[in-house]
Image: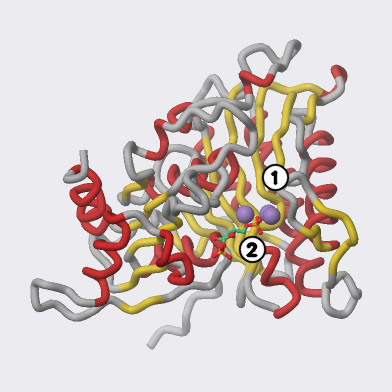
Amino acid sequence: HAAEAQRTDLMTITRHVLNEQSKHPEAHGDFTILLNHIVLGCKFVCNAVQKAGLAKLLGLAGVTNVQGEAQKKLDVLANEVFVKALISSGRTCILASEENEEAIVVEPLKRGRYCVVFDPLDGSSNIDCSVSVGTIFGIFMAKDKENPTLDDVLQSGKNLLAAGYCLYGSSCMLVLSTGNGVNGFTLDPSIGEFILTHPDIKVPSKGKIYSTNEGNAKYWDEPTAKYVESCKFPKDGSLPKSLRYIGSMVADVHRTLLYGGIFLYPADKKSPNGKLRVLYEVLPMSYVMEQAGGQAFTGNQRALELLPTKIHDRSPIFLGSYDDIEEIKALYAATE
Ligand code: AHG
Ligand code: MN
Ligand code: MN
Ligand code: MN
């Protein structure tokens, strides 16, 4: 066999976005600069997560965040890294982070036309036991960069220009969509570049895995309970689905994207709006899933049609393989 040609034509994420951008002549490189700063943040957090155990970054930071969660040091560090990277890009005018109660308005001299919503460290309860965590982000256009307002943040998922996530797992993968499908880039730590390894990701139309916290089963509503029951005891003679639940949304969604199946964090009697936050968890992940040919549903509407009224609004979410979501939609439709 001819020896595997030495890969000399490395498609880095920056080159990939520049290629994409050439399709939008009106873009002036701002988006590429913004994305490069998000990539910088991901590289930094990837490094910090891998060294957390050694750098004693584990354990509670002794403060609680707006979600009332005990903030771990890495939550705080990751948030500071992304806020600084996004502001220094000079391409944002207002930011919303899980870790900040209010939106962050960028100082006038550093303002650009984009609004970024993000979860700097997702799955942080898994940090202390070395289970995969991630970062989630979504990018909107601001209406008037000189006068950023909360309306620039509280936008419908339909307005997303781009969204993606970085998974700090056995490898560090950045998955991104700018509206023309989904691409996966793996960090090559030896050269510090994200290389295109998963071009044009498509989620399988049906899957054999369901992913949810069964510990909430006692509180589920009937359609969710019926759906999960059908995964475990199929009536059509098919094999039961496997249960895979990591407890980090980024890891559970990434597995769903590549292997197919369904991820669900439904509403329950304790949390009528579910647990996951609309702006920086539900919308970006729904955008990616749809761009990969899957679906994202809230129990009563297409997830991307959600319009948050507050930065930390929550929503139930069912996302994944197209056909699997059709089944849950039918069960909720039957209750109308
Ligand atoms: P975060 O760490 O950013 O607060 O997010 C945690 C979320 C999400 O990552 C995951 O899907 C979900 O919490 C798990 O919730 P349960 O532990 O209730 O299953
Ligand atoms: Mn949190
Ligand atoms: Mn999260
Ligand atoms: Mn988080």
Q: Amino acid at mark 2?
A: Gly
Figure coloring: secondary structure
* Disc 2 residue: CB within 8 Å of ligand 1: yes
- Please give the name of the residue rendered at 47% of the width and 46% of the height, measured from the top-left corner: 272
Q: Which residue is mark 2?
A: 123
Q: Compared with residue 91, is residue 279 higher up or lower down, i.e. above or below?
A: below
Q: Compared with residue 67, is residue 150 higher up or lower down, i.e. above or below?
A: above
Q: Which residue is mark 1?
A: 98
Query: Is disc 1 in contact with disc 2, using a CB cutoff of under 8 Å?
Result: no
Percent position of residue 110, x then y: 84, 24
Percent position of residue 141, x then y: 59, 23
Q: Compared with residue 101, is residue 208 higher up or lower down, i.e. above or below?
A: below
Res 44 visible: no
- Please give the name of the residue rendered at 56% of the width and 26% of the height, measured from the top-left corner: 309
Left or right relative to 102: residue 13: left
Quarter occupied by the N terminus:
bottom left
